Amino acid sequence: MLLILSGPSGAGKSTLCDRLLAAFPALKLSVSVTTRAPRGAEQDGVHYHFVTPERFAEMVAADAFAEHALVHGNRYGTSKAVVEEELRAGNSLLFDIDFQGAESLLAYRSDALAVMIFPPSMEVLEQRLRGRGTDSDEVVARRLHAARAEMAHFSSFHHLIINDDLEVAFEELRAIFVAGRTRTQHRADEVRRRFDLVASLNEI
Ligand code: ADP
Ligand code: 5GP
């Protein structure tokens, strides 16, 4: 299955993603392509594939993205090849992408499950962005400005989590993932393989 997390920068998406990935080894993080510079200890190929704007434009022209968007002045995209390959291998993929990407990915794959993460308040969001200590004042101001626009798109999403207490927020996300995995569309291949099902009682 495809599980999408979106929400304003600082809401806690990376923190929740890390916990979900640690809890479910079969779930993989979709590593996005971006034109932004690495932040803190970020590594190429692990947190993002860092590319030049020219390379990103070439990939757009080659139709290599399942979705891509301009976020806070930088370009971000999800490789079509990676999505298709992981789905073919029967893996679940986790996406940490913005609302534009979420809406595009839902159009590309209507069976994806989309979760919006909210902070408990705008004040707490600002504290978390500053507390993370990885962005300049100017970048924090730009991200706060964009937060309300991101959050206004909550109704495009299937679920909304308010990340106040991390334990509660994680439990909600875990429940969404576990329930999502049991949707019939994700189990169809498996049950057809394991059980000799028939269409009517007459066939028995
Ligand atoms: P995002 O990926 O959405 O930009 P992060 O996961 O980087 O957000 O979280 C932003 C900051 O807030 C980090 O320093 C993180 O440790 C902290 N944080 C995340 N969730 C909580 C929470 N529930 N309570 C307190 N701090 C949190
Ligand atoms: P950051 O620079 O803080 O890592 O990410 C900034 C924003 O870009 C976040 O909202 C994040 O979810 C979003 N983002 C990261 N990767 C992608 C992607 O591949 N596509 C889209 N549309 N947004 C992304």
Image (cartoon, rainbow, N blue to C red):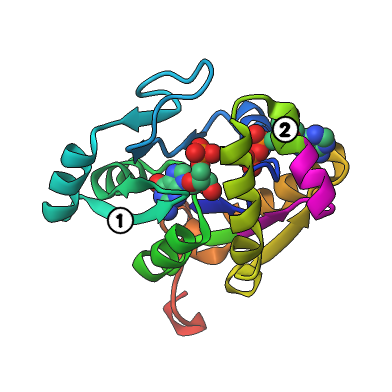
Question: Residue 148: image x %, image y %?
Answer: 66, 63
Is residue 31 something that shows in the picture? yes
Up/down of 90 relative to 25, above or below: below
Front tag of 1 and 2: 2
Question: Residue 34: within the magenta?
Answer: no
Per the image, the residue denoted by label 2 is 130
Q: Which residue is mark 1?
A: 66
The extreme front residue here reads 138
Give the number of the disc on residue 171.
none
Residue 20's x, y, as percent? 65, 36
Amino acid found under the numbered disc labelled 2: Arg
- What residue is drawn where x is 59% and y is 57%? 146
Instruction: Give the residue type that dot 1 points to.
Output: Ala
Q: Determine if the C-beta at disc 2 is less than 8 A from ligand 1.
A: no
- What separation in Å lies between label 1 and label 2 (alpha carbons)? 32 Å
Q: Is-magenta flag for residue 117?
A: yes
Range shown magenta? 115-127
Q: Position of residue 7 (x, y in %)?
A: 63, 53
Query: Which numbered disc, 1 or 2, marks the residue that appears first in the sequence?
Result: 1
Q: Quadrant of ligand 1?
A: top right
Residue 131 is left or right of residue 184, and the answer is right
Q: Is residue 78 left or right of residue 30?
A: left
